[in-house]
Image (cartoon, rainbow, N blue to C red):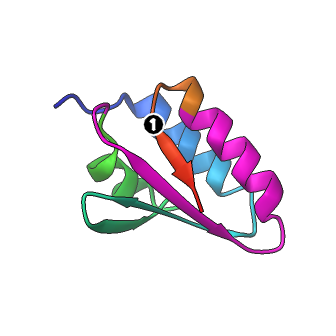
Amino acid sequence: MDGLGTRTIVEINQTANTFQSSIVMKVDNRVIDVKSILGLSLSLLHDSQYELEIHGPDELEAKAVMARLFEKHGLPVTLR
């Protein structure tokens, strides 16, 4: 299993932090706050399937932006 580069993790984290909505990622029976750089560093791998749950005042925009960002980095994601 290859982890992702630091730039990818930082980009995902910084983007998530621009939104007011809660953004959590489910992967391998774990729930990670995407706004936590440490959680992302330990959880993002190229060969995993990710599920993002986004809830809050700007969730529609957050879902669109986060989906594009995960796709940009070749990370399979579903949104809830």
Residue range highlighted in magenta: 46-70
Residue found 60% across the figure and 63% down from its top = 80
Query: In the displayed structure, does residue 32 sit left or right of residue 13?
Result: left
**In front: 6, or 27?**
27
Residue found 32% across the figure and 31% down from its top = 46
Is 1 above or below relative to 43?
above
Number of residues whose C-alpha sits closer than 10 Å to that of mark 1, classed few (under 14), some (14–19) or many (20 or more): some
**In front: 5, or 69?**
69
Residue 53 sits inside the magenta stretch: yes
Q: Position of residue 65 (x, y in %)?
A: 73, 43
Q: Position of residue 53 (x, y in %)?
A: 56, 65
**In front: 67, or 17?**
67
Q: Position of residue 11 (x, y in %)?
A: 57, 37
Residue found 30% across the figure and 41% down from its top = 48
Badge 1 element: loop
Task: Give the residue pinned by disc 1.
Answer: 76
Amino acid at circle 1: Pro
Residue 12 sits inside the magenta stretch: no
Q: Residue 79's quadrant in the figure?
A: bottom right
Query: In the displayed structure, does residue 68 sit left or right of residue 9?
Result: right
